């Protein structure tokens, strides 16, 4: 596959850009693969990529019922951070954040990673104590964060109102190396690299059944025919329960819609990411000038990919108190993604009761930031049967009471 570079762009300019190749192949499925991964979002594609890069496993198919990156990967607010309280969470998110920093070079594809920094506002005294505790935990984990006062918050984000009538800003947890990336580009970059290794990315191919024999997976049935495999990875976010049911087991998750919106584009006014969990809102400014705004998840189970008015009203009303200038903006787009929530608001990366079948789900509202770390750990688990990154996130923890409680860090905002 042709390498992207400044020289390649200059060369193509002289021949009217007629020499560019397709970024990835679109083949028909083969009868058999060593590994089939269901779900061509960021997590599924990253798993395939690291199977090939780290373990030399390239006889892999990534199958997707819709289009590549058309699920939550293309429907999130692109925030990247690793300032989690619990050790297993901090480990996998920090692995992901560190991989994001060089991912454009690794994939030879510009994912537009922007380490602009993330502030998690403390707007109650309870949050002040909680974020100070997290800062101490992060120091022990090797994750660089710090607790900052309100004046430092104002320096980093001049448009913020520190003296809100309901929730004044008392400080914040600051992660300087957090930031954002272009969500579509992450999926496209991984897809291009997987295709270059000889893997098959098969779109418009819905799984209709999981085939097994003697308690071991043997393949999947799809709308494009049966596909045999030795190992199966289920990486389908909000539809994980549906696929698990096909495989004969149940998951402790609930699927709900999480919604977000963007404003009309304006001149640059905010170069950090600000999260305000007390008022259920978070905001950043995109490279195109749009204010990217996210809020809470629906309070009822559903599979919609659209918003509900009461959540947008609540989120915008709360953020206007903290950022008065946005009251004059018009909404440009509004959407929802289907997220799968576990009881402890931590993901599941695990073997399953069906031998040879692995599951990656339960990321809730925090999936995008974890993509490289999730793919790294899931690939190691599928290739070797064990990964230090995924060990604490097994299905067994729910029956053994080993919960990884991240409800404060992950239950509302990204």
Image: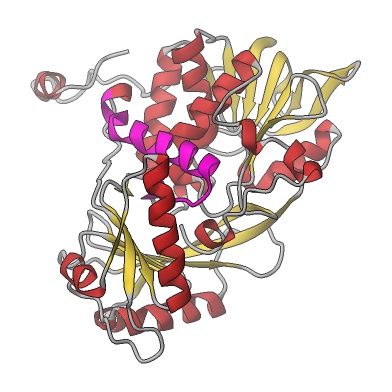
Q: Residue at x 31, y 22 (%)?
A: 106
The residue closer to the viewer here, 134 or 411, is 134
* Residue 3 left/right relative to 191: left
Q: What is the image's colouring?
A: secondary structure
Q: Quadrant of the N terminus?
A: top left
* Residue 272 left/right relative to 202: left
Compared to residue 200, the image places residue 41 above or below, namely below
Compared to residue 172, the image places residue 141 above or below, namely above
* Residue 144 left/right relative to 344: left
Residue 405: percent from the left, percent from the top?
62, 54
Q: Residue at x 27, y 14 (%)?
A: 2
Q: Residue at x 31, y 71 (%)?
A: 171
Region rendered in magenta? 79-105
Residue 212: percent from the left, percent from the top?
85, 20
Residue 48: percent from the left, percent from the top?
52, 22
Magenta segment includes 95: yes
Residue furthest bottom as drawn: 165
Residue 17 in view:
yes
């Amino acid at each position: 596959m042709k390498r992207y570079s400044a020289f390649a762009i200059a060369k193509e300019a002289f021949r009217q850009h007629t020499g560019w190749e397709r970024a990835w192949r679109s083949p028909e499925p083969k009868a058999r693969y060593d590994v089939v991964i269901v779900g061509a979002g960021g997590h599924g594609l990253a798993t395939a990529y690291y199977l090939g890069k780290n373990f030399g496993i390239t006889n892999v198919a990534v199958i997707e019922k819709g289009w590549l990156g058309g699920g939550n990967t293309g429907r999130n607010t692109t925030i990247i951070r690793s300032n989690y309280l619990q050790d297993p969470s901090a480990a996998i998110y920090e692995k992901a954040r560190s991989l994001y920093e060089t991912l454009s070079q690794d994939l030879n594809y510009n994912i537009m990673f922007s380490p602009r920094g993330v502030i998690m506002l403390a707007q109650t005294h309870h949050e002040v104590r909680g974020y100070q505790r997290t800062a101490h935990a992060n120091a022990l984990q090797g994750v660089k964060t710090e607790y900052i006062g309100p004046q430092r918050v104002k320096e980093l984000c001049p448009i913020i109102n520190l003296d809100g009538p309901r929730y004044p800003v008392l400080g914040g947890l600051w992660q300087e190396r957090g930031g954002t990336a272009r969500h579509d580009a992450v999926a496209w970059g991984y897809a291009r690299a997987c295709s270059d290794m000889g893997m098959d990315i098969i779109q418009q191919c819905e799984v209709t059944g999981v085939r097994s024999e003697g308690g071991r997976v043997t393949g999947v049935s799809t709308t494009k025919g049966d596909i045999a495999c030795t190992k199966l990875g289920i990486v389908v976010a909000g539809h994980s329960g549906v696929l698990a049911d096909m495989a004969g087991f149940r998951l402790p998750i609930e699927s709900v819609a999480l919604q977000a919106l963007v404003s009309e584009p304006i001149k640059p006014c905010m170069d950090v990411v600000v999260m305000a969990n007390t008022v259920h809102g978070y905001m950043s400014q995109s490279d195109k000038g749009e204010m990217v705004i996210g809020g809470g998840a629906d309070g009822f189970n559903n599979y919609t990919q659209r918003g509900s008015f009461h959540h947008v009203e609540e989120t915008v009303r709360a953020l206007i108190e903290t950022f008065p200038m946005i009251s004059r903006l018009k909404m440009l787009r509004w959407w929802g993604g289907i997220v799968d929530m576990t009881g402890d608001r931590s993901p599941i990366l695990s073997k399953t009761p069906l031998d040879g079948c692995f599951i990656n789900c339960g990321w809730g509202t925090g999936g995008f930031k974890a993509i490289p770390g999730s793919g790294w750990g899931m690939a190691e688990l599928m290739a070797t049967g064990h990964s230090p990154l995924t060990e604490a996130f097994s299905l067994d923890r729910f029956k053994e009471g080993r919960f990884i409680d991240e409800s404060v860090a992950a239950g509302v905002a990204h």
